[in-house]
Amino acid sequence: MIAKLKYFSFIQNSFINNCMMFGIKKVFFFLNSILIHAQNLQYESNGRIVDDMKNKLSVNQVKALLSDNKELLKNYTDARTKKDVGNVLLYGGLTILATDLSIGFFGPKVVDYPTGLTIVGALSMIIAVPVKIGYSKRIKKVVDDYNATNGVGYYNIEKLEFISNNSGVGLRLTIK
């Protein structure tokens, strides 16, 4: 009789544990999907965007996140274009300036310096500064608007842990 009770108790406990595990799995996957989609973006230097866990997002990942909001996506792509134009102006101007000055210093002394290329290179570098400053402001605005429209920022789910002890099993949700 005692053996039958122990066996029945074992079956009952394993059935309850399986049901609890099935329910916990559902809750775990539900909360995990919330964690994936409810991420707060942050702007870092040089146009980088990171998530809550400081993982760098690629341009394509950011565009995928912004694909639901066409206005934010357009502003983000405009800002990235502005960054690329600023880089071309800055490094192109530096290259033109360095090349022309090196020809002036080490080449034949036939031409008076500064030439038109030196002036174009210097102007290109000067124009690149406000262009590059403007793109960072635009990307910061896109990140702020994204965080505001998603309602993220009121709380931050730091981690979700599966725990067990003598009393049972459960989930621990750490909110920052």
Image (cartoon, rainbow, N blue to C red):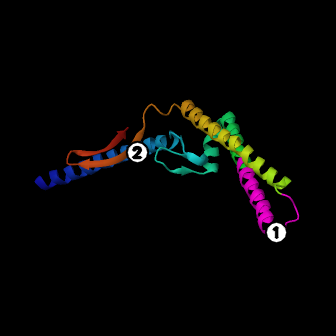
Of label 1 and label 2, which has the lower sequence position?
Answer: 2
Q: Residue at x 50, y 50 (%)?
A: 55
Residue 14 drawn in magenta: no
Q: Residue furthest right?
A: 110
Q: Position of residue 65 (x, y in %)?
A: 60, 42
Q: How many marks?
A: 2
In the image, taking residue 75 as reference, residue 5 lies left or right, namely: left
154 shown above or below 109: above
Please name whichever residue, 75 or 165, is drawn nearer the observer in this view of the structure. 75
Q: CA distance from mark 1 to mark 2?
A: 71 Å
Identity, as a three-letter code, of the amino acid under mark 1: Gly
Q: Are marks 1 and 2 in contact (CB under 8 Å)?
A: no
**What percent of the width, then of the height, locates residue 81?**
72, 45
Of residues 69 and 144, the one nearer the viewer is: 144
Check disc 1 and report the residue beneath it.
107
Span of residues in magenta? 86-112
Mark 2 surroundings: few (<14), some (14-19) or many (≥20) residues within 10 A: some
Measuring from the top left, give residue 106's x and y in whole percent.
Answer: 78, 68
- The tag on residue 158 is none
Q: Where's the C terminus, which quadrant?
A: top left
- Residue at horizontal 54 percent and vertical 34 percent from the top: 147
**Residue 104 lies in magenta, yes or no?**
yes
Give whichever of 101, 26 is nearer the camera: 101
Q: Which residue is mark 2?
A: 28
Q: In the visual, does 50 lie left or right of 142? A: left
Answer yes or no: is residue 48 visible. no
Q: Residues within 10 Å of mark 1 (few under 14, many from 20)?
A: few
Secondary-structure class at tag 2: helix
Q: Does 154 sit left or right of 49 as displayed?
A: left
Of helix, strand and loop, which mostly describes the magenta segment?
helix
